[in-house]
Image: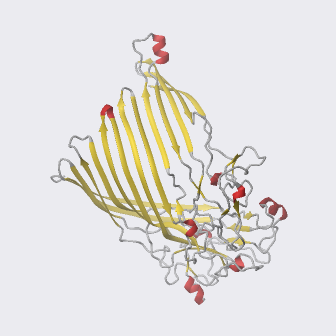
């Protein structure tokens, strides 16, 4: 404390580690699609293999040191106005894989035919720690992360019943997940992984004439083989770590009204830059009438997927919020909140924020002028409307009633939680590589999207999307449906609890508890990624809903309290 100032400062330090040793993909996986036979199960029965993947396990030894410094001042400018302002410094580095399981792909070096000096058989353009220009951790540290923030609280009338509050600030996301480099450590030469699209070999021998790299050895020798096509995962070749940052701002008005009620309305917004996303650098080229496989038509020959761990994503969030609260009086308290929000971003549909992974890129190739055009839209977690109310109601103890009535009906406590929200975004996928790029083609809409016709004679099943209103894009095309263009059904549930204490002795009582979840047994359908391909045109079950969340669940319990 210094006069009207309340100054605080502090330091945060954290040492973290992740050690992993498992048999990821050592048993191989086989993928069948409808591209050839129109039915994935028919492709399986005929042995028409679409994808094949095998690995040698997943091993990593990650270390991280996370620190932060801050200073903050709360200044009472007047009886009505209080100001808060401060600054946080938070340097950042990516996780240190202490055995150097990091690689970097540089397109310009590929074009010049430059090769790694650390592993002589690596294809052109692929480099490792020890090669010139490759940071030991894949990216250099970021040491200019200064994050200011400021806020205020203003007592309008001076009696504490009406206040205006606001604030803004920058917040760096320096805590990269400890498994962000999962795909980095799963590739040749550290833990060889083979991924074929349209393999030349049959179902019985996907390798064909090529030699299997398994079992593998570690540490890898300098002349280890790199069986083609090589799967690669890379940070941005610049080596610059663009730390994700969020800019938040809010303004709220609160008013205490009679009867212990408090009302609040607020605007809350944010913008995020440098959000983690994955970009596929090596899509195939569409060649009309070509008999070549997907891998044979890729831009960078000798490679299969080249997944770029990029920090180029952007998102925005805006919301209007209103809430009412009744403080406990007369044995009753309630808190209710309504939020009307909109969240938008330009990141790939179902983007994996936990780290780069092959097969989760944009619908268009990265070199298109509008490469993320079909992926600019509602965020995967965008919920436009949400209302939540909770309450606790303590019924009268009926102390003046007869013992039997008082014991049976008095002193109950009722609790509840009611939630309802609008549906999450629904992105309609093609499910077939019509563009022949190996990317994630979208559906084409031809009529009213919602309606019957998806279930047929299947049960249990609910019609939702009209299959006749959607189709596959023409060969060489990518589809037209944007990310989140449709909406899944909303969700509503009401949980209730009934509690009563029965005194036994002065310090001993028995508590009866009856709890019910989704007490009115409303059917809440599961999101599309949890159902049978609801959002994929080329898959069986397209447009139907065949799974739901939990029905009504009740539980009874007795609890002894002493």
Q: Residue at x 60, y 48 (%)?
A: 489
Q: Residue at x 59, y 87 (%)?
A: 111
Q: Nearer the viewer, residue 205 or 342?
A: 342
Q: Quadrant of residue 505?
A: top left
Q: Quadrant of residue 551?
A: top right
* Residue 232 visible, this angle: yes
Q: How far across and how far down the image is residue 61, in percent? A: 53, 65
- Left/right placement of residue 435 relative to residue 347 reads right
* Residue 353 visible, this angle: no
Check the image and name the residue furthest to the bottom: 112
Number of on-image labels? 0
Quadrant of the frame with the C terminus: top left
- Left/right placement of residue 195 relative to residue 403 reads right
Can you say whether 298 is above or below 71 in the image? below
Q: How far across and how far down the image is residue 243, in percent? A: 43, 68
Q: How far across and how far down the image is residue 207, in percent? A: 77, 73
- Left/right placement of residue 135 relative to residue 546 reads left
Check the image and name the residue furthest to the front: 447
Q: How far across and how far down the image is residue 73, in percent? A: 24, 56
- Left/right placement of residue 286 relative to residue 386 reads right
Q: Residue at x 50, y 84 (%)?
A: 132
Q: Quadrant of residue 278?
A: bottom right
């Amino acid at each position: 404390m210094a006069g009207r100032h309340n100054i605080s400062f502090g330091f945060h330090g954290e040492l973290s580690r992740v050690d992993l040793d498992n048999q990821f993909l050592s048993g191989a996986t086989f993928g069948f699609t409808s591209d050839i036979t129109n039915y994935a199960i028919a492709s399986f029965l005929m042995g028409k293999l679409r994808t094949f993947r095998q690995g040698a396990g997943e091993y990593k030894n990650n270390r991280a040191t996370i620190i932060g410094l801050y200073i903050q001042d709360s200044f009472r400018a007047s009886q009505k106005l209080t100001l808060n302002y401060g600054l946080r410094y938070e340097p950042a580095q990516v996780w240190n894989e202490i055995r150097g399981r990091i690689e970097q792909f540089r397109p310009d070096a590929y074009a010049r035919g430059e090769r790694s000096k650390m592993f002589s058989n690596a294809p052109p353009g692929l480099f490792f720690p020890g090669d010139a220009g490759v940071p030991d951790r894949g990216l250099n540290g970021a040491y200019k992360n200064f994050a200011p923030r400021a806020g205020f609280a203003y007592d309008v009338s001076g009696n504490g019943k009406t206040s205006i509050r606001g604030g803004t600030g920058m917040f760096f996301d320096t805590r990269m997940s400890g498994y962000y480099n999962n795909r980095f450590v799963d590739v040749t030469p550290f833990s060889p992984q083979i991924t074929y699209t349209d393999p030349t070999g049959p179902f019985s021998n996907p390798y064909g004439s090529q030699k299997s790299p398994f079992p593998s050895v570690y540490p890898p020798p300098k002349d280890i083989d790199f069986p083609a096509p090589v799967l690669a995962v890379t940070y941005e070749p610049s080596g610059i770590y663009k730390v994700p940052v969020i800019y938040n701002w809010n303004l709220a008005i609160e008013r205490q009204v009679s009867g212990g009620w408090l009302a609040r309305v607020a605007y809350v917004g944010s913008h995020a830059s440098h959000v983690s996303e994955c970009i596929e650098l090596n899509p195939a080229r569409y060649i009309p009438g070509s008999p070549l496989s997907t891998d044979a038509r890729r831009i960078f020959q000798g490679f299969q997927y080249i997944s770029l761990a990029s920090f180029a994503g952007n998102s925005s969030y805006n919301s209007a919020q209103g809430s009412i609260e009744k403080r406990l009086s007369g044995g009753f308290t309630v808190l209710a909140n309504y939020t009307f929000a909109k969240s938008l971003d330009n990141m790939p549909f179902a983007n994996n924020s936990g780290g780069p992974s092959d097969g989760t890129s944009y619908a268009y190739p990265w070199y298109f002028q509008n490469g993320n055009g079909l992926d600019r839209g509602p965020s995967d977690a965008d919920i436009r409307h949400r209302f939540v109310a909770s309450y606790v109601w303590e019924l009268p103890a009926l102390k003046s009633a007869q013992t039997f009535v008082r014991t049976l009906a008095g002193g109950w406590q009722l609790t509840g939680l009611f939630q309802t929200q609008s549906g999450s975004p629904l992105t309609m996928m093609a499910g077939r590589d019509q563009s022949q790029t190996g990317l994630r083609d979208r559906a084409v809409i031809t009529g009213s999207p919602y309606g019957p016709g998806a279930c047929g004679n299947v049960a249990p099943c609910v019609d939702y999307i009209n299959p006749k209103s959607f189709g596959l894009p023409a060969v060489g095309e990518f589809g037209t449906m944007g990310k989140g263009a449709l909406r899944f059904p909303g969700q509503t549930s009401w949980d209730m609890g009934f509690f009563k204490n029965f005194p036994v002795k002065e310090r001993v009582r028995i508590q009866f508890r009856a709890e019910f979840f989704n007490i009115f047994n409303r059917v809440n359908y599961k999101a599309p990624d949890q159902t049978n391909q609801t959002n994929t045109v080329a898959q069986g079950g397209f447009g139907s809903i065949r799974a739901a969340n939990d029905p009504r669940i009740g539980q009874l319990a007795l609890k002894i309290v002493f």
